[in-house]
Amino acid sequence: MTAWLSDAEVVRRLFAHMDRGGTDLAEGVWREPVAHYRSPDRYAAELALLRGSATAFCPSAALPDTGSHLARTAAGTPLVAARGADGRVRVFRNACRHRGARVVEGDGCSKAFVCRYHGWTYGLDGALRHVPHPDGFPDLDRPGRGLVALPTIETHGLVFVTQDPDGAADPGLDEWPVLVPAGNRLVQAADQELPVNWKVFAESFLEGYHIRSTHRDTFYPVQYDNLNVVEHVGPYTRITFPYRAIERLRGRPAAEWRIEGKLTYVYHVFPNVMIATFPHFVFMVAIEPLAIDRTRFLTWITTAGARGDPASDAPAEPRLRVTPAEGAALIAAGAAEDNAAAIAVQEGLASGANAWLEFGRSEGALQHFHRTLRAALAARGVAPEATA
């Protein structure tokens, strides 16, 4: 497959599954060695892969204006993204060229970046603009001492970067729909940590086999258990989670089908970013490994509504049965259940009960994630652990 199915084709496939009690199935099962979640060498290789890949750094909505900037750590490296006076977003290594201190903390809007240690000042384009007491640096090569820029591209509502100075930041999404619409505004950002391997956290997004057992009182009353459409385009995956409200489309001409409020698309932008579409909101989640058993995940919530709290700004649509506030609360409750399950999995990895984790045919998105990750690491000379 070279492009995603149309919305109508997705709905047709969902109806076919519902009528026969099925779901999209992979050809076989996949065994992922537990050692891949616990090996320091494997973890180091994965971190190197993240640094060398084109990864989504933040949504464009997080940098709405000239001077908007966002600093965070990506794959263990402090970086900062900023929108310049020319409208272009650039990503730099967040390190002063004098003594290496960070020049930016968090997010905000500035005309220049001033290192708090000694006051070296940089423009939004990264150029070194001012050095206090310049007589102390008589031979300073100012043009060559700006912030170190990394290959960056802004596309499909996201900012992509690679830490490989000779690499390409373009993720190759030409045939994709816009993931975060240009009119969307950032209404909430969060930064959390969990005591889990980054892959365990990523896996919680990629299958609907757990909906009934994990989300009995949250998602299951409005969604289906083990009913998904799973698509792959190159290394990327889109998994569709339908709502029970999709039944309202039956009997209507396909030309009148509207999926808003009828399903959620989750895009896995390999290797470590998830984009999820909900009624009223689009989420971006960046999954950042901190250690073998510790992960930071950064969440940006955007909406077509005004700036402010997502629970109050986006207008409720008459055809939806939940308000934005109710939807936000439901998503938060479901996410907490997924996080608890991920922690339980991480604890189970240390039990010695399993030499591998087994992903069944209805967990095809998980299989694709690990198959793609294994291939990317193999291209770097990293061999997988054997399974019996």
Image: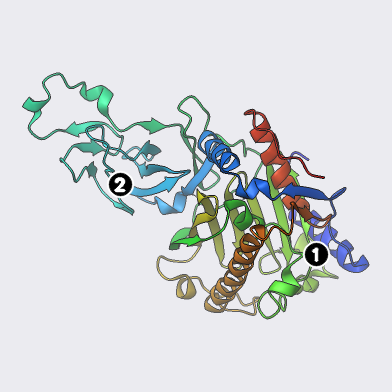
Q: Amino acid at mark 2?
A: Gly
Q: Is residue 243 visible?
A: no
- Crowdedness of circle 2 by 10 Å Cα count: few (<14), some, many (20+)? many
Instruction: Tell me the residue at 73%/70% (across/down).
Output: 211
Question: As drawn, is 265 to the left or to the right of 310?
Answer: right
Q: Nearer the viewer, residue 40 or 66?
A: 40
Question: Which mark lies nearer to you, 2 or 1?
Answer: 1
Q: Is residue 39 visible?
A: yes
Q: x and y percent of residue 142 in the render? A: 21, 24
Quarter where residue 330 is shown: bottom right
> Looking at the picture, does residue 317 appear above or below residue 67?
below
Instruction: Tell me the residue at 62%/51% (across/down).
Output: 199
Q: Nearer the viewer, residue 344 or 337?
A: 344
Helix, strand, or loop for circle 2? loop
Instruction: Tell me the residue at 41%/47% (across/down).
Output: 73
Instruction: Tell me the residue at 45%/27% (across/down).
Output: 165
Residue, disc 2: 67
Quarter where residue 339 is shown: bottom right
Residue found at the very far right of the displayed protein: 20
Residue, disc 1: 227
- Crowdedness of circle 1 by 10 Å Cα count: few (<14), some, many (20+)? many
What label does residue 310 carry, if any?
none
Residue found at the very far top of the displayed protein: 139
Helix, strand, or loop for circle 1? loop
- Quarter of the image with the C terminus in it: top right
- Quarter of the image with the N terminus in it: top right
Q: Amino acid at mark 1?
A: Leu
